[in-house]
Amino acid sequence: MDSAALAERIEKLRDLLRNYEYHYYVLDQPLVSDNEFDTLMRELAGLEAMHPELISPDSPTQRVGGKARESFPTIRHRAVLLSLDNAFSLKDLQDFGQRIQRSEIESGYIAELKIDGLSIALVYENGVLVSAATRGDGINGEDVTANVRTIKSIPLKLKITLPRLEVRGEVYLPKREFVRINQEREERGDKIFANPRNAAAGSLRQLDPGITAKRSLAAFIYDIVFIEGDEISSQKAALELLTSCGLPVNRQYRACSGIDEVYSYCLECDENRHKLPYEIDGVVVKLDDIAARSLIGQTAKSPRWAIAYKFPAEEKETRLIQVELNVGRTGVISPTAVMEPVALAGTTVSRASLHNFDLLKEKDIRVGDLVLVHKAGDIIPEIIRSFPEKRDGSEQEILPPRHCPACGSNASQSSGEVALRCENINCPARLKESLSFFSSRDAMDMEGIGPALVEQLVDRQLVKNIGDLYAMDEELLSGLDRMGRKSAANILRSVENSKVKPLHRLITALGIRHVGSKTARLLCHQYRNINDFLHLDSAELTAIPEIGPIVAASITGFFSEEHNRDLIERLRQAGINMEEGAALQLSTALNGKTFVLTGTLESMSRIEAAEKLQSLGARVSGSVSQKTDYVVAGSDPGSKYDKAVQLGVTILSETELQDLLENA
């Protein structure tokens, strides 16, 4: 392909992908399957990797990337981003309308949903996104351009090319993402987000854009701050232009001729807000005529031509009857409130997560208390506070358990964590998760044992702990759904092959908190037999430079738990290798070479690639420097690729890596 044809193909791919992104993330009308989209994205990323001189900042491949920053620089806004005065009743809205009428201005209103998120200011030059900033103090905001580029509903290139366009909008977290993120944070023992707005702000202000990219933020654009190359006479026209540019606009706005219509719309939105996939906390009412706005003016803080009608908070009082203890799939023990049923946000609520015992203590919630309840993120029932002044003395303090309610093992809390955990890897409540991880590719690599099979094995009580995997036979497996003799034989062969894996694989597979494959390999370089792990203390572990007190406490806690020691003994009896083996003496062509891996590899995971390189004596690093010999670039490479180009480091494709491995 000549250079002209190559450039034409790259631009065609970009246009296709931008259009598919717009229909998927803005219109919610997918045009192609995920597989077809991913295939085109891989083709584009591959062409750009081979021809980095053709990469442009508005390419769909450039959404995620860039290294973590130490702090956010500031951006000065062209115009002060004002806040809005609030209205809480029909009278407040009528007062606002009367002030408009006294100015003798004839204009209708545009009423828009007030998205509960984080204000954002975007600047496009010649149709390309060049900067994004938070509201900040209204005069200066934080430069979050790298993070905003990861939000797929915000186009990197507009459909209409204008010399300069500055807009304002709201970044938000969809309700389903709010639930997912809080579940994950609770399982990890992290503090949960109080509401989607809090979560959106925390996500957008991550110093590492890679973390922001995982949060699935979205946005709505609702205002034009400055435009060059066009003129806008009304708010309705502004929203239509924003839509034509391909920017995400909330289409549920309404043109209203008077305040009575505005109020009816506000009541309608309040009634239906629980059906929306995002959270709103009111309605923003704006004068439609933009020229008239300058006549009405503004105060030092707020425009006089707009107001925010705020919905009344939905909070109800009820009584806490009892607290149940639940064990999650990662061993987190969480208290759940059982309450007298109460109607709240369209449903009847009788249970609410209390999240963790530190929060219970902080809020001083007791069994028998009258409590105030709402729905966090308009979804999750949550106790806001108790009423100590209404106690009669019969209330009972809620204390954290010392043992797991599911298996009786020790319950422990790591330093710096809010979560209380069961340390037993074979706890019935977390067994499915433990089995899936133990048999996964990066652990013991038991091919064929996936979530569906694990589900059957546990639900039918055929496997009651990890050790039972090594007691399975063909008759047991072939009786399961969609499992023939051949499939059963393949699984049993894979299970048998796992017995000879090196010790670091087993340490990884045990799922010790804070111990991944890299730390497991580090530990097994120091302690080469499983018996060494059974007698470790924190002081000995923290003497290793890479091991801190939290990781050390997690390791010693795991191996001191009796159920885990019993499992290790059973695995020993099953013939599992318990040694790391002798240190390798290598003399391959890759011995001593330093590699960095970036992007997604197709034929193997990055962990597998790292293990193969390390087995041949190579060193795998997480950062690119002058000492790096090779950077292996898969699809969607990150900032490591850019650094390699800058330093002149040799860049290998996945095919070239495979050739190196085969010939080493």
Image: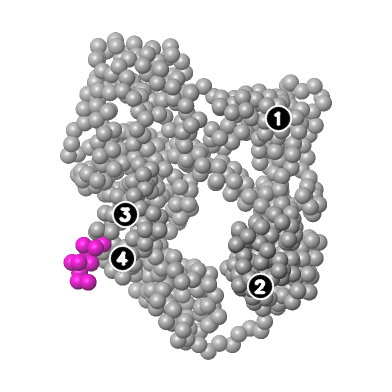
Query: Given the image, on which type of amino acid does mark 2 rest?
Result: Leu
Q: Secondary structure at mark 3?
A: helix
Task: Give the spatial CA distance, label 4 vs label 2.
Answer: 43 Å
Residue shown at 59% from the left, 67% from the top: 448
Label ID, residue 17: 3
| Residue that mark 2 sits on | 492
**Residue 573 rendering spot, x and y as whole percentages:** 78, 74
Q: Secondary structure at mark 4?
A: helix
Q: Are marks 3 and 4 in contact (CB under 8 Å)?
A: no
Query: Given the image, on which type of amino acid does mark 1 rest?
Result: Met
In this view, the mark in front (3 or 2):
2
| Residue that mark 4 sits on | 48
Q: Which residues are magenta?
A: 1-10
Task: Give the spatial CA distance, label 1 vs label 4.
Answer: 58 Å
Coloring basis for residues: one colour
Residue 242 in which image quadrant = top left
